[in-house]
Amino acid sequence: MSEVSSKEMYEVKKTLKELENKKGRGTELVSVYIPPEKQISDVRKQMVDEIGQSSNIKSKQTRKNVQSAIEVIIQRLKLFPKAPEKGLVMFVGMIPKGGPGTEKMETYVFQPPETVQTYIYHCDSQFYIEPLRQIIEYKEVYGVVVLDRKESTIAVLRGKRIDILKHLTSGVPGKHKAGGQSQRRFDRVIELAAHEFLKRIGRHVDEAFLPLKDELKGVLIGGPGHTKNDFVEGDYIHYEIHDKIINIVDTSYTGDFGVREVIDESADTLDEMDIMQEKKLMRKFLTGLISESGLSTYGEKEVRQNLQMGAVETLLISENLKTKRQTYTCPACNTIDIITTRQHQEAPEQRCPKCNEIMKVTGTQETAEELIELAEEVNSSVEVISIETEEGTQLDKAFGGIAGILRYKVK
């Protein structure tokens, strides 16, 4: 899986937020997901067929709106001789702005940051955004190991995709009642076989997870009985993998079902990991504000300056940041000025500081996008902070939604 950049992730989150609030009057909002291997000509042909099928829609207005949306899709598809490398996503439909007759056609066409897996054509009163939502859920890689004395399965969780890497069986004998000396000897044989099986599992876990250790955010262990605890407590896996164990779960199954059970039972832990990461970064930022080191900065102007100097280690952006950068150009002397305004604020009139001529707006970009681009240019990491925590709300309200943790103290 290719790495999703901070800017791409921000764009996906922003688009999702816009789309989830869009509703049509009927089942007239069209969503299309096109995998890279899908022929665009085939998609266009299906869209033409869908126009014919939509003539069966009873509501005249819904029928008209669906056909208009499909026609927009057909026109947009002409811009693509073939599907882009990661596929194409399209959301098109008439969105009401008020009462009847206020509908306006809205179109979202973009190449997603991850490959589209399945071709989808979907028509409903809301856009079908679940496949897009999956891109931002559990983005990090997690290792999963489920085991008992009989078998073990090793897997990797990427987003919502589960890749089964290895399935092992033990050959450990079952319980046997021989009595006396024979019983003790048989028990030792069983324990030795179980120990050897755990060592074998450990070798395969190391082979599977060590190459991923830099991107592996955590390891989940599960299984019925106590074998999983023996595995965790024993010296069976590399310390770098052992240190990443974040959850140990009792399951009813091993195998593929056990893997899914571990993941389902760990959902709260995975969510908490993301929240804890945000809390940790915000606490580091807040500590830097009051310490002598002074390795914290906030405010749009200050953060931008520090980014341009390459001094920012981690850029913190609130997901609730609602400002944009507007570029003004003087038509008389070509002087350029850039100001920040609220997202939905109309561009204020601006006069040239040199010749006093009224300037024209020649460019608009969201503040978050601009700062993320600056951060990527100087290899600063970026974290988009939610407003679900007290610290995230503090970033939004008290610090204007923009802050940074510095690499070194700026004088």
Image (cartoon, rainbow, N blue to C red):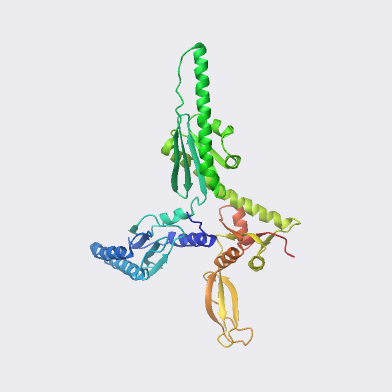
Instruction: Please determine whether, in this image, residue 277 is positioned above or below residue 61.
Output: above
Q: Is residue 26 left or right of residue 382?
A: left
The picture quadrant where one finds residue 81 is bottom left
Q: Residue at x 34, y 57 (%)?
A: 120
Judging depth in this view, the residue of 127 and 331 nearest the camera is 331
Question: Residue 71 or 253: which is nearer the viewer?
Answer: 253
Q: Is residue 56 above or below residue 233?
A: below
The structure residue drawn at horizontal position 70% and vertical position 54%, both measured from the top left corner, is 287
Left or right: 18 as drawn, with respect to 366: left
- State the image coordinates of residue 281 (x, y, percent, origin top left): 63, 53
For residue 318, say whether it is visible: yes
| The C terminus: image quadrant | bottom right
Question: Which quadrant would residue 360 be assigned to in this image?
Answer: bottom right
Residue 16, image x and y in percent?
Answer: 46, 59
**Quick check: 69 above or below 395?**
below
Q: Tell me residue 402's x, y (percent).
A: 61, 62
Between residue 303 and residue 401, name the one nearer to us: 303
The residue most toward the right is 292
Q: Position of residue 258 (x, y in %)?
A: 44, 37
Q: Nearer the viewer, residue 18 or 23?
A: 18
Left or right? Give the position of 71 relative to 311.
left
Q: How many marks?
A: 0
Residue 346 visible within the image: no
On the rendered structure, is 382 left or right of 160?
right
- Residue located 63% across and 83% down the image: 353
Which quarter of the picture shows residue 95? bottom left
Identify which residue is drawn at 45% across, 18% down.
Answer: 176
